[in-house]
Amino acid sequence: MKTLTTERLILRSFTMDDAADFYEYAKDPDTGIHAGWKPHESIEESRRILTSFLEADETWAICERSTQKVIGSIGLHPDSMRSLRPDRCRMMGYVLSKAYWGQGLMTEAAREVQRFAFEEMGLSLLSIRHASYNRRSARVIEKLGFSYEGTLHQSGERFDGVILDTCLYAMTREEYEAQKGKTSKASHSTFCLGTSHLKD
């Protein structure tokens, strides 16, 4: 995985040395249940899952730049609901330690992965989904500008037997480019206004 950086984060490949940090957030019931998986019961379980991350090579460790601590993960995976090849379409998935919620960090990481997916991987479509009860994830997706495609009712069963409804979103390359263009124009207008003000 190519290492990516943002103002506050480093996104890099996991290593087995990350097991302790991974287990620290993955054992939290609130973190796991929002991501749809069973909280880890031991560091050995975290090590087994880390091994699968390394084999698939689709998931970044989200690290806090100031401490280098691993505080979550984000990945680009084949989308099982679409028949497009993985080099044209991927699904973004992520999880963040509860201790870091509410700081805009997940949006920051996801925005950089969104950029990487379209500008460096050359994807034609990026999808993303969340369980209907996960409003935090919905807010991240909305900030990124994805289009809501619908809700797949009774799409699966969670580890504790709860039946899930899944909200589906996607963004095409054309939509990404249009959104990027609007952002650039808005930034240019703000700069011009600021320059004009300075001259007054």
Image (cartoon, rainbow, N blue to C red):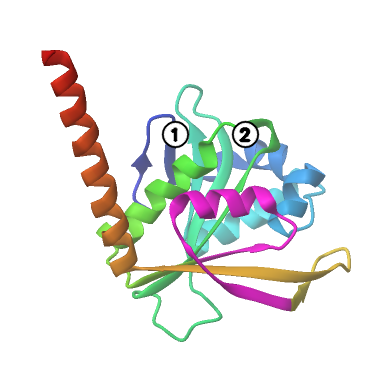
Among the 4 quarters of the image, the one containing residue 27: top right
The residue drawn where x is 74% and y is 59% is: 37
Q: Is residue 67 above or below residue 200?
A: below
Whether residue 133 is in magenta: the answer is yes
Dot in front, 1 or 2: 2
Instruction: Name the one closer to the observer, 144 or 25.
Output: 144
> Where does residue 77 sit, x and y in percent of width and height?
49, 67
- List the residue tagged with mark 1: 9
- Measured in 3D between alpha carbons, the distance from the residue under mark 1 to the one under mark 2, in whole angstroms, is 15 Å
> Where does residue 45 sit, x and y in percent of width and height?
74, 52
Whether residue 116 is in magenta: the answer is no
Q: Furthest-front residue in view?
A: 200
Secondary-structure class at tag 2: loop
* Label pair 1/2, CB-CB below 8 angstroms: no
The answer to whether residue 170 is visible is yes
Would you call the spot at circle 1 few (<14 residues within 10 Å), some (14-19), or many (20 or more)? many
Q: Which mark is residue 21?
A: none
> Where does residue 131 sit, x and y in percent of width and height?
70, 63
- List the residue tagged with mark 2: 102
Image: magenta residue range: 128-153
